[in-house]
Amino acid sequence: MRHALLVLPFFLLCGPVQASTWQICRMELRITEVVKQPYPQLKAQVLKVNPASATVECPAQGATLTFTPETPDYQRTLPRRQWPGKGQSVRIDYRYLDGVCKGDGHSHECRIKHYPMAGP
């Protein structure tokens, strides 16, 4: 009991912590271009969109995206030899996380985006 009384003030001093969750949009895309400059990326048109929940902000059907494809676990960039070519259709599980980024001593709202290739 004595230990609990010593720890209690520290919990009261801490502000509330809010955890964010990944928001996911399952999309079918058609690759329209393999961009080489300023760095390799894919440009694609959104064919179909399926948000994981009603609150997810997905790109609109017909919109154009430029992105770097990632492995299904979104931990690494997909090797370029595995990138789809122009005209191919692919499935992407686009996911994002909104938060606060810090840089140059200033905090600002930001969105972390991932474009993992979905399995067959």
Image: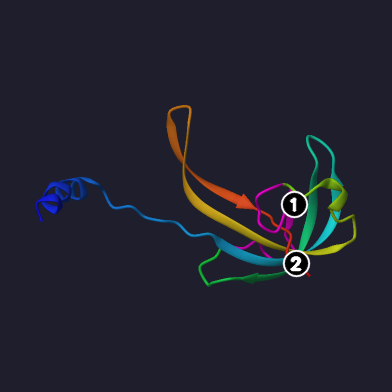
Name the foreground residue: 47 vs 103.
Answer: 103
Give the quadrant of residue 119. bottom right
Is residue 66 visible in the rendered structure shown here?
yes
Name which of mark 1 and mark 2 comes first in the sequence.
Answer: 1
Residue shown at the point (43%, 32%) measured from the top left: 106
Name the foreground residue: 90 vs 109.
Answer: 90
Query: Can you say whether 108 is above or below 44 in the image?
Result: above
Q: Which residues are magenta?
A: 57-76
In this figure, which residue is indicated by the disc labeled 1? 69
The quadrant of the rendering that contains the C terminus is bottom right
Dominant SS in magenta: loop
Q: Secondary structure at mark 2?
A: loop
Q: Is residue 47 left or right of residue 25?
A: right
Is residue 61 visible in the rendered structure shown here?
no
Q: Is residue 114 left or right of residue 90?
A: left
- For badge 2, the amino acid type reads Gly
Query: Can you say whether 34 is above or below 29 in the image?
Result: above
Comparing marks 1 and 2, which lies closer to the viewer?
2
Q: Position of residue 116 (x, y in %)?
A: 70, 57
Q: Position of residue 90 (x, y in %)?
A: 80, 64
- Distance from Cα at disc 1 to Cα at disc 2: 13 Å
- For badge 1, the amino acid type reads Pro
Residue shown at the point (90%, 55%) measured from the top left: 86
Residue shown at the point (55%, 62%) measured from the top left: 23
Label 1: few (<14), some (14–19) or many (≥20) C-alpha neighbours in 10 Å: many
Q: Is residue 17 left or right of residue 59?
A: left
Query: Can you say whether 109 is above or below 49 in the image?
Result: above
Q: Is residue 70 magenta?
A: yes
Q: Position of residue 81 (x, y in %)?
A: 87, 48
Q: Position of residue 16 (x, y in %)?
A: 28, 52
In this figure, which residue is indicated by the disc labeled 2? 119
